[in-house]
Image: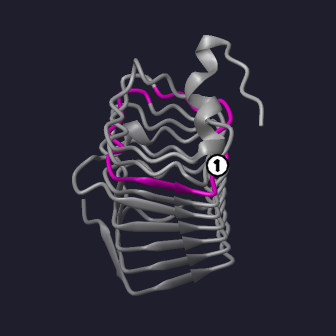
Amino acid sequence: MNQSYFESKTFSRTSFIQNPPEKGEYENCIFKDCDFSGCDLTGIVFMECSFEGCNLSLAKISNAAFQEIRFKTSKLLGLHFENCNTFLFSIDFDHCVLNLSSFYKLSLKRTKFRECSIQEVDFSETDLSGSSFDGCDLTGALFDNTNLEKTDFRTAVQYTIDPEKNRMKKARFSLAGVEGLLAKYGIQIEP
């Protein structure tokens, strides 16, 4: 079966809810204000694409490939990124909502999260080494056996991380964030 190939194409204000995108490869494409919510993106390959103002909430992304992808001002609620094709998997997020998503056991080295809502997201056994959470809300995010070495949390808020259950060598935190590292001890920190 022949698969479609799209290169350097812009998709603007398109709803893919009733008519999902064609199976195939999308290289260097731009998706602006598109609605993929609940779509089946199984097996689709996205290479060097950007998603701006898009809604991918609850999309099925089994075996979908996200290679050098940038998400900006997009909603990605409840996505199971661990089901994606991990070959050359590389993503960045800028002003996105990722609540209730999962990155279980993925390699997200040097991933940038900027001004994102990352509430109740599962980062268990994920490699986040060298990543940054600039201005992100991590309320209820789960870090368990996660590699956080050299990860930057200095401007992140509302995180709770157990230093005894995660690798954290050279991770960066602000003084205000220390409470999130000591929460399990029931210590009260006052100004």
- Front in this rendered view, residue 159 or 56: 159
Q: In the rendered image, which residue does mark 1 sit on?
A: 57
* Amino acid on which the number 1 mark rests in the picture: Ser
Residue 58 in sight from this viewpoint: no
Image coordinates for residue 95, horizontal then vertical, percent? 64, 64
Vertical relation: 82 (above or below) 130:
above
Q: Which quadrant is the N terminus positioned in?
A: bottom left
Image coordinates for residue 70, horizontal then vertical, percent? 47, 68
Question: Residue at left 61%, top 58%?
Answer: 36
Residue 22 in sight from this viewpoint: yes
Image coordinates for residue 163, horizontal then vertical, percent? 44, 24
State the colouring used for the structure image. Answer: one colour
Vertical relation: 64 (above or below) 46:
above
Question: Residue at left 44%, top 42%?
Answer: 81
Image coordinates for residue 113, horizontal then vertical, percent? 52, 57
Segment tinted magenta in the rendering: 124-143
Instruction: Judge whether residue 134 is colored magenta.
Output: yes
100 on left or right of 1: right
Instruction: Judge whether residue 108 is colored magenta.
Output: no
**Which secondary structure is most common in the magenta stretch?**
loop
- Front in this rendered view, residue 176 or 105: 176
Q: Residue furthest right?
A: 191
Q: Residue furthest front?
A: 191
169 on left or right of 186: left
- Front in this rendered view, residue 153 or 116: 153
Q: Which quadrant is the C terminus positioned in?
A: top right
20 on left or right of 34: left
Vertical relation: 43 (above or below) 31:
above
Within 10 Å of disc 1 (Cα), the crowding (few <14, some 14-19, many 20+) is many
Q: Secondary structure at mark 1?
A: loop
Question: Residue at left 38%, top 37%?
Answer: 83
- Front in this rendered view, residue 135 or 181: 181
